[in-house]
Image (cartoon, helix red, strand yellow):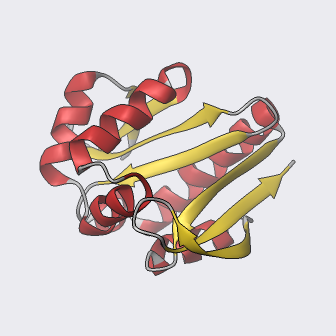
Amino acid sequence: MIRFETTTMQHCEQLNKNIGDMDTREIYDSTGLDAYQGIVLCYQLSKEDCEVALDQHNQVLSIHGVMDRGTYGAPWMLLSKNAYRRAGLREGMTETIDWVNRKLKTYGRLMNYISEENTRTIKWLQCLGFDIKEKIQNYGFSKKPFYKFERCS
Protein backbone atom coordinates (compact mmCIF):
# COMPACT_ATOMS: atom_id res chain seq x y z
CA MET A 1 0.00 0.00 0.00
CA ILE A 2 1.40 3.38 -1.04
CA ARG A 3 0.71 6.39 1.16
CA PHE A 4 1.33 10.01 0.15
CA GLU A 5 2.09 13.01 2.31
CA THR A 6 3.71 16.41 2.10
CA THR A 7 7.49 16.17 1.76
CA THR A 8 9.77 17.28 4.60
CA MET A 9 13.54 17.68 4.79
CA GLN A 10 13.61 14.40 6.73
CA HIS A 11 12.13 12.65 3.70
CA CYS A 12 14.85 14.22 1.53
CA GLU A 13 17.50 12.89 3.90
CA GLN A 14 15.93 9.43 3.90
CA LEU A 15 15.76 9.31 0.09
CA ASN A 16 19.38 10.43 -0.16
CA LYS A 17 20.46 7.32 1.75
CA ASN A 18 18.68 5.05 -0.75
CA ILE A 19 18.34 6.97 -4.03
CA GLY A 20 18.55 4.96 -7.22
CA ASP A 21 21.75 5.02 -9.25
CA MET A 22 20.02 6.27 -12.40
CA ASP A 23 18.54 9.27 -10.59
CA THR A 24 21.93 10.04 -9.02
CA ARG A 25 23.52 10.08 -12.48
CA GLU A 26 20.68 12.09 -13.99
CA ILE A 27 20.90 14.75 -11.28
CA TYR A 28 24.62 15.10 -11.87
CA ASP A 29 24.38 15.06 -15.66
CA SER A 30 21.67 17.72 -15.76
CA THR A 31 22.85 20.02 -12.95
CA GLY A 32 26.36 19.05 -11.80
CA LEU A 33 24.99 18.58 -8.26
CA ASP A 34 25.38 15.52 -6.05
CA ALA A 35 22.27 13.51 -5.21
CA TYR A 36 21.48 15.23 -1.91
CA GLN A 37 21.90 18.72 -3.38
CA GLY A 38 19.61 17.74 -6.28
CA ILE A 39 16.93 16.29 -4.00
CA VAL A 40 16.93 19.41 -1.84
CA LEU A 41 16.89 21.75 -4.87
CA CYS A 42 13.88 19.94 -6.37
CA TYR A 43 12.13 20.05 -3.01
CA GLN A 44 12.84 23.76 -2.54
CA LEU A 45 11.68 24.66 -6.06
CA SER A 46 8.46 22.65 -5.63
CA LYS A 47 7.59 23.15 -1.95
CA GLU A 48 4.01 24.10 -2.80
CA ASP A 49 3.57 21.00 -4.95
CA CYS A 50 5.86 18.28 -3.59
CA GLU A 51 4.91 14.97 -2.01
CA VAL A 52 6.52 11.79 -0.87
CA ALA A 53 5.34 8.23 -1.54
CA LEU A 54 5.84 5.92 1.44
CA ASP A 55 5.49 2.15 1.66
CA GLN A 56 3.79 0.26 4.50
CA HIS A 57 7.01 0.49 6.56
CA ASN A 58 7.23 4.31 6.16
CA GLN A 59 10.19 3.96 3.79
CA VAL A 60 10.46 6.56 1.03
CA LEU A 61 9.67 5.12 -2.40
CA SER A 62 9.86 8.45 -4.22
CA ILE A 63 9.70 12.18 -3.86
CA HIS A 64 7.95 13.93 -6.70
CA GLY A 65 6.62 17.33 -7.52
CA VAL A 66 5.99 19.99 -10.10
CA MET A 67 7.94 23.21 -10.54
CA ASP A 68 5.65 26.03 -11.64
CA ARG A 69 7.17 27.57 -14.78
CA GLY A 70 4.38 30.07 -15.42
CA THR A 71 3.10 28.66 -18.72
CA TYR A 72 3.59 25.01 -17.75
CA GLY A 73 4.53 22.70 -14.90
CA ALA A 74 7.83 20.81 -14.86
CA PRO A 75 7.14 17.41 -13.25
CA TRP A 76 9.95 15.39 -11.67
CA MET A 77 10.29 12.23 -9.64
CA LEU A 78 13.28 10.83 -7.78
CA LEU A 79 13.11 7.16 -6.87
CA SER A 80 14.62 5.03 -4.16
CA LYS A 81 16.41 1.84 -5.12
CA ASN A 82 13.91 -0.86 -6.10
CA ALA A 83 10.99 1.61 -5.89
CA TYR A 84 9.19 0.02 -8.85
CA ARG A 85 9.36 -3.43 -7.27
CA ARG A 86 8.53 -2.25 -3.75
CA ALA A 87 5.52 -0.18 -4.88
CA GLY A 88 4.04 -2.86 -7.10
CA LEU A 89 3.56 -2.20 -10.79
CA ARG A 90 -0.24 -2.03 -10.84
CA GLU A 91 -0.59 0.23 -7.80
CA GLY A 92 2.34 2.39 -8.85
CA MET A 93 0.90 2.92 -12.33
CA THR A 94 -2.60 3.68 -11.03
CA GLU A 95 -1.32 6.20 -8.50
CA THR A 96 0.97 7.85 -11.04
CA ILE A 97 -1.78 8.18 -13.66
CA ASP A 98 -4.06 9.79 -11.07
CA TRP A 99 -1.27 12.18 -10.01
CA VAL A 100 -0.48 13.20 -13.61
CA ASN A 101 -4.17 13.81 -14.34
CA ARG A 102 -4.52 16.01 -11.24
CA LYS A 103 -1.42 18.00 -12.21
CA LEU A 104 -2.69 18.47 -15.77
CA LYS A 105 -5.84 20.07 -14.34
CA THR A 106 -3.66 22.49 -12.38
CA TYR A 107 -1.01 23.32 -14.99
CA GLY A 108 -2.60 22.43 -18.36
CA ARG A 109 0.80 21.42 -19.74
CA LEU A 110 3.54 19.31 -18.16
CA MET A 111 7.03 19.33 -19.68
CA ASN A 112 10.55 18.44 -18.61
CA TYR A 113 13.68 16.57 -19.74
CA ILE A 114 14.94 13.04 -19.11
CA SER A 115 18.26 11.34 -19.74
CA GLU A 116 18.41 9.10 -22.79
CA GLU A 117 19.93 6.47 -20.45
CA ASN A 118 16.85 6.41 -18.20
CA THR A 119 15.03 3.89 -20.39
CA ARG A 120 12.81 2.45 -17.65
CA THR A 121 11.36 5.84 -16.80
CA ILE A 122 11.02 6.78 -20.49
CA LYS A 123 8.80 3.70 -20.94
CA TRP A 124 6.85 4.67 -17.80
CA LEU A 125 6.32 8.21 -19.14
CA GLN A 126 5.06 6.84 -22.46
CA CYS A 127 2.58 4.61 -20.59
CA LEU A 128 1.38 7.75 -18.81
CA GLY A 129 0.63 9.42 -22.13
CA PHE A 130 3.66 11.69 -22.35
CA ASP A 131 5.13 12.39 -25.77
CA ILE A 132 8.86 11.91 -25.92
CA LYS A 133 9.78 14.89 -28.03
CA GLU A 134 12.99 16.19 -29.45
CA LYS A 135 16.36 14.81 -28.46
CA ILE A 136 18.84 17.37 -27.12
CA GLN A 137 22.33 16.04 -27.80
CA ASN A 138 24.25 18.25 -25.34
CA TYR A 139 21.89 18.85 -22.43
CA GLY A 140 22.82 20.12 -19.00
CA PHE A 141 26.05 20.05 -17.05
CA SER A 142 27.52 16.92 -18.63
CA LYS A 143 26.32 17.76 -22.16
CA LYS A 144 24.72 14.32 -22.57
CA PRO A 145 21.67 13.32 -24.65
CA PHE A 146 18.33 14.06 -22.97
CA TYR A 147 14.79 13.92 -24.33
CA LYS A 148 12.10 16.52 -23.87
CA PHE A 149 8.86 14.96 -22.62
CA GLU A 150 5.47 16.65 -22.65
CA ARG A 151 1.77 16.12 -22.08
CA CYS A 152 -1.06 18.60 -22.41
CA SER A 153 -4.59 18.42 -21.02
Determine the residue positioned at 74% across, 59% down.
150
Query: Can you say whether 74 is above or below 132 in the image?
Result: above
Determine the residue positioned at 43% across, 36% down.
42
Q: Position of residue 73 (x, y in %)?
A: 70, 39
| Residue 57 visible within the image | no
Foreground: 41 or 106? Answer: 41
Q: Position of residue 10 (x, y in %)?
A: 20, 25
Query: Can you say whether 7 is above or below 61 in the image?
Result: above
Determine the residue positioned at 57% across, 77% down.
123
Determine the residue positioned at 82% across, 35% down.
71
Foreground: 23 or 98? Answer: 23
Q: How many numbered marks, from 0 up?
A: 0
Q: Is residue 67 left or right of residue 83?
A: right
Q: Residue furthest left?
A: 17
Q: Position of residue 70 (x, y in %)?
A: 77, 29
Q: Position of residue 105 (x, y in %)?
A: 80, 35
Query: Can you say whether 128 is above or below 118 in the image?
Result: above
Quadrant of the image occupied by residue 38:
top left
| Residue 100 visible within the image | yes
Quadrant of the image occupied by residue 41:
top left
